[in-house]
Amino acid sequence: MVFISNNIFVVHNLSEKLDFKQMRIASFSEKCVGCRTCEVACAFHHRRTFGRKSSSLSVRRFEREGRFEIVIYEKREGERPACDLCGGEPMPLCVKLCPVGALEAVG
């Protein structure tokens, strides 16, 4: 499991289907509003369902502190598949569909 915070972190190399040699996902937790659109988009990519628990990422809520944390799974954990950066797509769907820009693809 990999925690993404305000730092830029290399998740892994993309498959040859995409033109990028390496992609990073930058997360800006101060922008995250906890809508979980990223989780739903990821689950749809992997399983063609909208179940958040089959997503390669999760949004953790810390209600007392009023903050959120995005967790990306780079290895399979239970039902959660490993993040493949939406291989076959021009951009990871979590990045593309985040309504507030809390996730960005860089690299």
Image (cartoon, rainbow, N blue to C red):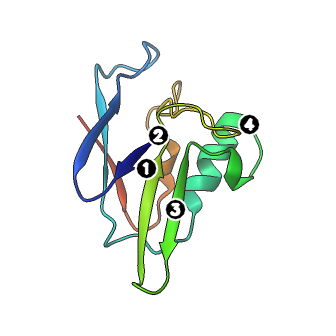
Q: Which amino acid lies under the numbered mark 3 shown in the image of this protein?
A: Val
Give the percent coordinates (x, y) of residue 104.
Answer: 33, 50
Q: Which amino acid lies under the numbered mark 4 shown in the image of this protein?
A: Arg
In the depicted structure, whether residue 5 falls above or below residue 15: below
Q: Answer whether labels 3 and 2 touch (C-beta < 8 Å).
A: no
Pointer 4: what residue? 47
Under circle 2, the secondary element is: loop
Q: Which amino acid lies under the numbered mark 1 shown in the image of this protein?
A: Val
Q: Nearer the viewer, mark 3 or mark 2?
A: 3
**Between disc 4 and disc 2, whose residue precedes?**
4
**Between disc 1 and disc 3, whose residue precedes?**
3
Residue at image x 39%, y 22%? 14
Q: Nearer the viewer, mark 3 or mark 4?
A: 3
Q: How many other residues sit within 10 Å of disc 1, few (<14), some (14-19) or many (≥20)?
A: many
Pointer 3: what residue? 59
Give the percent coordinates (x, y) of residue 105.
Answer: 32, 43
Q: Nearer the viewer, mark 1 or mark 3?
A: 3
Query: How far apart, in angstroms, are the residues tagged by discs 3 and 2?
Result: 16 Å
Q: Quadrant of residue 107?
A: top left
Q: Is residue 34 found left or right of 105 in the rendered image?
A: right
Q: Which amino acid lies under the numbered mark 2 shown in the image of this protein?
A: Pro
Under circle 1, the secondary element is: helix
**Between disc 3 and disc 4, whose residue precedes?**
4
Q: How many other residues sit within 10 Å of disc 2, few (<14), some (14-19) or many (≥20)?
A: many
Pointer 1: what residue? 95
Give the percent coordinates (x, y) of residue 39.
Answer: 59, 54
Query: How far apart, in angstroms, are the residues tagged by discs 3 and 4?
Result: 19 Å
Pointer 2: what residue? 92
Q: Answer whether labels 1 and 2 touch (C-beta < 8 Å).
A: yes
Under circle 4, the secondary element is: helix
